[in-house]
Amino acid sequence: MKKLSIIVAATALLSAGGCKKYLEEEPSRVASIKSVDQLEALLNNAGRFVTENNYTSTWSTDDAEIPASAYKASSGQFTPETIYSYLFTTDQMQNNMASDPLWSGEFSKIFNVNLTLSYIDKVSGSEEAKQRLKADAHFIRAYSNWVLANYYCLPYTAANEGSKGLPLKKTIGYTESLKRATLKETYDFILADIAEAQKTNVDDVDPKAPWRASKKAIAAFLSRYYLFLGNYDKAIEQADLALSTSTVKLKDFKTLAAGTPVNYKNPDVLINFSELNDWTAAKYYYWPEFFYLRFAYTPGWWYLPSASLVSLYDQSNDLRFKWLMFPQGGRYFSPGTANLYRYGMFQDMSYLPSAPTIAEVLLNKAEALARKNDAAGAMSAVNLLRDKRMNTVSPLAASTKEEAIQKVLEERRREMPFVMRWYDIRRFSVNDYPADDVVITRNFFQINGSVVNTEVPQTYTLPVGSKRYAVPINGVELDAARGQLEQNDY
């Protein structure tokens, strides 16, 4: 345990410095790693790997809306980072933010698994344990690189294969290049890691440790991976493999209980939360729908839904609206925002599932079937989910490909707001179906540097195919890389 504490202390020290530490500096003392048990303890520390601290997914899509009037009345409730993301800025996100927690967080995970892979063949312990840890490490690295690629790179298409990918960190050495690989090289590296992860000797998800890799978890991820590439046959194949699980189950929202209500004064607002709002990590880590454990986390704890998102719910019958969407939830932040919605799920509405769940896999399958013109099959898959989300039976029906795609995508948005929408908007822009393209428009105020001028209205647009689909890399990271790490082209 003493030796392990040295590892943990070293990685904790590294986490304080973001990319400068993870991509440049030589790791400090790790020579005390002697046994597979120490590496097991490192990867079994779920809290180190499961959170995605993410401004973009929270604020940069049409799932979010900050009414100009609300900002003008209560601007102090919205941080500069929130506004930069909300308005799709480039210069401010590069130059005005002290750090980017998503970038540094994912490279932190990659460092830790590279540490594991660097030592796994040097430590004592059984080959079976080592093989499992290797699979875990490769899956974590693949997943983190996939997340990074889908924020900081352009969407994957044949035309974009030569565009800027990621700096591919394969070791813990400080001399490893920070030059960005191509997008194709990045995706090839992800698939190579997946192939290694598939060698795991664990078939199904362990409900007591859903943060560990399994063949079913990898299949669930691949149903997403191939859907995003437009390979619908493989998406369905991997979804079916994942759905053969015997341990991952849909949660019937009819069984959710009320949580601790909160009563505010001035103005009087009563919020009747579900039990999920009271859950801490000791409980929500074991949400039965997880194939794998990852959470989107929003700094500030506010998922502020747009009018277009709210309008998608059957407010009298959809239990997701009842338990996850609160019309006066903005009162949590100030009296001035009491009339704004708040969406959320776990631990004071701050954590949302972001790794593959059985709900997502059903939706991945349904969408792939719809795009292959199997409307009946798509509705069958999506209605398995709706049966666990609606108060009374309310199946969807579609008779055409176009109708099926529309209904599945609407259900996808209802089920996974603020998590999948950024990913989806990007991929919609490069598929062969223009009807799903999304243009995001903000009616807000002029921003100059870090100053918002509430006397000058301004409209901002994120058009289809925008180069801003690639999130700017933070300037602190660029400076630390001493010219090796290049910014995206805008």
Image (cartoon, grey):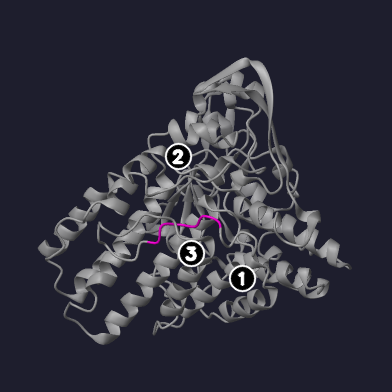
The residue closer to the viewer here, 116 or 407, is 116
Question: For the residues carrying marks 1 and 2, which lies nearer the camera in this image?
Answer: 1
Element type at mark 2:
loop
The residue closer to the viewer here, 479 or 208, is 479
Q: Which residues are magenta?
A: 163-168
Q: Which mark is residue 299?
A: 2
Q: Which residue is mark 1?
A: 226
Q: What amino acid is labelled 3 in the image?
A: Thr
- Asked if residue 236 lies left or right of residue 209, the reply is right
Q: Earlier in the sequence, mark 1 or mark 2?
A: 1
Tell whether position 164 is magenta: yes
Residue 430, position in %: x, y? 70, 58
Question: For the residues carrying marks 2 and 3, which lies nearer the camera in this image?
Answer: 3
Q: Earlier in the sequence, mark 1 or mark 3?
A: 3
Q: Which mark is residue 186?
A: 3
Q: What amino acid is labelled 1 in the image?
A: Tyr
Q: Is residue 425 above or below residue 394?
A: above
Task: Identify the residue shown where x is 32% and y is 82%.
Answer: 131
Q: Is residue 14 above or below residue 203?
A: above
Tag 1 near tag 2, CB within 8 Å: no
Residue 419, position in %: x, y? 57, 52
Q: Residue furthest top?
A: 455
Q: Is residue 319 above or below residue 298?
A: below
- Asked if residue 98 lies left or right of residue 376, the reply is left
Tag 1 near tag 3, CB within 8 Å: no
